[in-house]
Each structure stands twice: as C-alpha cells, then as structure tokens.
Image (cartoon, grey):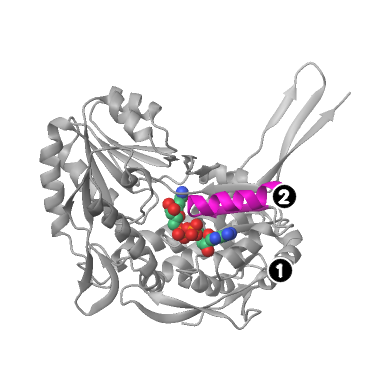
C-alpha cells in the first residue's frame, strides 16, 4: 500500500521524495509506505482549505448534514475493507475493528450530521435598558486536527466530523504509525462529493507535519489527541499565537472495586477495561484497587481468566488480544516489566513476557500482564504504560481509595464498582477525572462531554462541546428605541 496525501479533493504526490515505512505489527514486516510530508505540503493543504472556506462556511446546515450522513453510510458500507485495513495497520483483532472502531467512525459522522442541525446559540435581553444581545457562533476558518494510533479512524473522525459540520475547513494529520484508514477515507470523501479543499489529509511525522500544522500562523485552532508530553509541546508552540486548543492527552485510570459490587459483572468488565485493544486505550483502567475483603478472591479469579484469553494473530476469529502497535512501543511496555523485575515492591502475578505467535513469529505480541504493587508512588502506578499491563493493590476504606486514585498527575477516566448508590455518588464527586463510569466501562453517549483533567488535557470533545470548540462565539449587542 503506497499512501498519498489527500489535498483539494484528490490524492496528490508529496513535495519531497522521502517515504516512511509502514509496518504490519502482527508479522513485524513492512507492508507499505507513507509520504514523509513537510511544511510545503501543509502550506499547500492550507491554501486549498482557505480557498474552500468561504463557500463551505456558507452552505446550509441541511446540505452539510446530508454530506456527513453520506460519509457515515459509506464508512458503514465499507466496514469489511476498513476494518481489515485498521487491524493490519494497528495489530488490533479484526473482530474489534469490525465491532468498535469502524462503526464508531461512522457514528461520529452520523452524530455530528444531526448535532449541527440542533446546534443553537443564546440570546440575552438586558431587561429595562432596551438592549438585546445575541450570540453568533461562526466557524473559525482553517483548523488543524491531529490524532494518535490507538483508535485510528475512530479518533480521526471524532475531530474532523465536528470541525467540518461547524463549517470549518481542515488540515488533518493521522498518526504516521497507522495511516491506512485515513487514507481510505479520502476515497469516500471524493465519492460523496465533499467539496474539494474542505478536508485535507497530510501524512508524515509528528515533528514535521504535525509541527507545521501547529506552528502555521493562519491555522487558528488545533484539536489534538495524543501523549501528554506532545500536548505540552503543542501548547508551548500554539499559546503565543493565541490559538484555540483542545488537548486530549494521556491517562492512568483507576478501576475501583468495592466488595459490595456485582462480582461477576465486575470481573468480566475488568478484563475488558484492563486489556481491550491490548491495553492501548487512553480510557483503560490500568490501576486496579480492590477492597481487602475480596482482594484474594479477585486476584485468583482475575489471573485465572486472563491466563485463558488467547493472544494471537489479529485476523483469527478466536484471538482475544492482538499485537502491540510497533516494536518500539512493545519495547517500552516490556521495559516497565523489567523495572518491576529489578525493583522491590512488585510481584508479577501473571505474564510479563513477549510472545512468539505460531506463523507470526516476528509480530509484536505480549502476554497480558498483572502486577501486584505495594506503593502507589511506584513508577508502574504513576506513569502511563499504555499497554497490556495492570497493577493490583488492596484498600480498606472509601477515603483511602479516593486518595490513591487521585494521587497521580493524570485525570482522564475512572471506573467504580459498587451496588451502593450513595457510595457511588460520594466517590464520583471526589474523583479527579473527566469521566466516572459506575458499574460499566467505555459506555459512551456521544452527547456527553469527553476529556480529562490535570495532565490528561484541556477542553472537552463530544456533543455540543465539540461544536462550541469549532466555532467562535460573537456577542452582538443592539440598543433600540
Ligand atoms: P503522540 O503524542 O506520540 O502522537 C499523537 C499525534 O501527534 C500523532 O499524529 C503524531 O504524529 C503527532 N505529533 C507528534 N509530535 C508532534 C508535534 N511536535 N507537533 C504536532 N503533532 C505531533 O501519541 P501516540 O503515541 O500516537 O498516542 C498515544 C497517546 O495518546 C497516549 O498517551 C494516550 O493516552 C493518548 N490518547 C489520549 C486520548 C484521549 O482522548 N485523551 C485518546 C487516545 C490516545
């Protein structure tokens, strides 16, 4: 697969002759090439986006909505092709890409196609002064969207759909680690007749293409999802230019299990919240805190079930966990296990090793790994690993577990298991996290605000929050006689 940039409604050659290798992580081999675009490609994409803006921002909401709905339909119609491409590019099980990633990409377009028709602004009458204020919500202009590799098309579309629904034109960059489905999206955009220049997709390295988008003086807003260190760098670049910024960053999410929970349901969902997508979801619960009275029981059952799940080639229907996304990421995750082996305070209860999968011996596979820790300040409880590694720790009281949960730099998501509604409410209010799931995990209503606190980000995506981000509010104040 030789990927091309999608600029001004067609696939185009990039400026330089440099290419990046694209790996299939399930076999550890190069299977395609990606343009290593540069600042000139971003400038070209910007110029076409700018040219498209006056017309696109003046299309009726109904027209925009219909185009987005058609994109949603075509993503759905191409489910098999897109899911296969996603699985091959990322290493995730094919069934997962079919059940979650691609349906959600379609849902993102469908949701914002409808949301834009329901988006309204406010009016404020200043009573007794003959003054009327109303708020215009105008598209910003050309905006930048930058997405990561873990949920490639899912997160790419989560940004570009609200951006274009609100009337903006976009210069977007998918992760260079997983560019395939964003590339295929270009074909769909052409087929549905999205006007040329409205959505431009430039491929390449973050430090080159991403940086050029963020540093571009006339790209007025940046919606970014990725690591906290990259987010901090982006903020440093964009802040002096006073760009609007939405930063969805890393997490180190607690999974809090009280003894009075529905044990069977909790156990099943905790496997998913720990290891879904090989633990490479920003929302995965990587620190599991279990009330002491059920700690031993949980430990035994959890290890037993996890050990029975198959790690294998993503294309096999019975594979539960696939490959990690890249060799360097696998090495990073394994380095945390090494740290646990070399230091006190850790007991590896299960896993910890790279795996050779028959027929795919060079793939980037790893056992799901469960490590018991004694100190919440340890590296494995403080740093984002973003792989199939979870820690276990017992707790005695509600106050204690809230304090353990909050004692990290991150504040993205959290999961709480209890049948006691009063306790659930108390804990929810005290947790420093943008999302609290009670007796559920990754349960998403696209209307809700999505994002994190602390080092997990700034701003919220989802529903009206995203449409507010991608519009500039303007107060019009009228004094009448
Ligand atoms: P990353 O920060 O390395 O890269 C994310 C994107 O930013 C990529 O497209 C990359 O090319 C680009 N980039 C890199 N350097 C850049 C720069 N200097 N300027 C502009 N763009 C640049 O992250 P990743 O490794 O792709 O993804 C994993 C991280 O993403 C994890 O930390 C995870 O928690 C986070 N994440 C967060 C959410 C969320 O919603 N909060 C969702 C998914 C992933």
Q: Give coordinates of residue 277: x percent, y percent.
A: 32, 59
The residue closer to the viewer here, 419 or 275, is 275
Q: Give coordinates of residue 333: x percent, y percent.
A: 33, 59
Q: Which residues are magenta?
A: 221-241
The relative height of residue 159 versus residue 94 in the rendered view (above or below) is above
Badge 2: few (under 14), some or many (20 or more) residues near its Cα, within 10 Å? some
Q: Is residue 421 visible?
A: no
Please name the residue shown 41% across and 60% down the image: 150
Would residue 277 be found to the left or right of residue 175 on screen?
left
Q: Give coordinates of residue 43: x percent, y percent.
A: 71, 68
Residue 43: mark in rendering: 1
The residue closer to the viewer here, 27 or 65, is 27
The residue closer to the viewer here, 81 or 119, is 81
SS class, disc 1: helix
**Residue 260: within the magenta?**
no
Residue 293: mark in rendering: none
Residue at mark 1: C-beta within 8 A of ligand 1 = no
Q: Is residue 381 visible?
A: yes
Please name the residue shown 26% across and 41% down the image: 288
Label 1 vs label 2: CA separation?
Answer: 17 Å
Majority secondary structure of magenta residues: helix
Disc 2 marks which residue?
A: 241
Residue found farthest to the top: 128
Residue 418, quarter of picture: top left
Please name the residue shown 32% across and 59% down the image: 335
Please name the residue shown 18% across and 64% down the image: 310
């Amino acid at each position: 697969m030789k990927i091309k940039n999608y600029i001004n409604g067609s696939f185009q050659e990039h400026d330089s002759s440099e290419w990046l290798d694209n790996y299939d992580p399930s076999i550890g081999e190069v299977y395609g090439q990606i343009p290593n675009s540069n600042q000139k490609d971003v400038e070209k994409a910007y110029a076409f986006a700018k040219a498209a803006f006056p017309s696109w921002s003046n299309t009726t909401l109904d027209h925009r909505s219909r185009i987005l709905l058609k994109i949603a339909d075509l993503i759905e119609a191409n489910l098999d092709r897109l899911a296969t491409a996603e699985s091959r590019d990322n290493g995730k099980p094919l069934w997962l890409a079919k059940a979650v990633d691609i349906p959600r990409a379609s849902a993102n377009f469908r949701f914002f196609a409808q949301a834009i028709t329901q988006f309204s602004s406010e009016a404020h009458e200043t009573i007794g002064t003959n003054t009327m204020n109303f708020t215009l919500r105008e598209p910003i202009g050309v905006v930048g969207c930058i997405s990561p590799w873990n949920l490639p098309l899912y997160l790419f579309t989560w940004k570009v759909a609200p951006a274009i629904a609100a009337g903006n034109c976009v210069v977007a960059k998918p992760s260079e680690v997983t560019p395939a489905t964003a590339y295929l999206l270009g074909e769909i955009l052409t087929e549905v007749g999205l006007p040329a220049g409205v959505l431009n997709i430039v491929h390449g390295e973050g430090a080159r293409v991403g940086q050029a988008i963020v540093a571009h003086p006339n790209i007025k807003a940046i919606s970014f999802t990725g690591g906290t260190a990259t987010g901090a760098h982006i903020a440093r670049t964009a802040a002096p230019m006073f760009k609007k910024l939405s930063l969805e960053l890393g997490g180190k999410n607690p999974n809090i299990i009280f003894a009075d929970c529905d044990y069977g349901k909790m156990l099943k969902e905790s496997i998913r919240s720990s290891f879904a997508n090989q633990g490479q979801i920003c929302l995965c619960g990587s620190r599991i805190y279990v009330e002491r009275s059920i700690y031993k029981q949980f430990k035994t059952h959890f290890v037993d079930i996890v050990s029975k799940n198959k790690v294998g080639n993503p294309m096999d229907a019975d594979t539960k966990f696939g490959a990690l996304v890249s060799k360097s990421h696998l090495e990073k995750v394994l380095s945390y296990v090494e740290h646990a082996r070399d230091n006190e305070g850790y007991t590896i209860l299960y896993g910890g090793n790279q795996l050779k999968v028959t027929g795919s011996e060079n793939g980037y596979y790893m056992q799901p790994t469960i490590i018991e820790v004694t100190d919440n300040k340890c590296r494995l409880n403080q740093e984002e690993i973003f792989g199939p590694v979870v820690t276990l720790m017992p707790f005695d009281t509600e106050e204690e577990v809230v304090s353990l949960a909050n004692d990290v730099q991150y504040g993205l998501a959290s999961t709480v298991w209890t049948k006691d509604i009063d306790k659930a409410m108390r804990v929810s209010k005290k947790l420093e996290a943008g999302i609290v799931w009670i007796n559920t995990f990754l349960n998403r209503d696209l209307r809700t605000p999505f994002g994190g606190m602390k080092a997990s980000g700034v701003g919220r995506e989802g529903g009206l929050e995203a449409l507010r981000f991608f519009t500039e509010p303007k107060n019009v104040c009228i004094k009448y006689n």
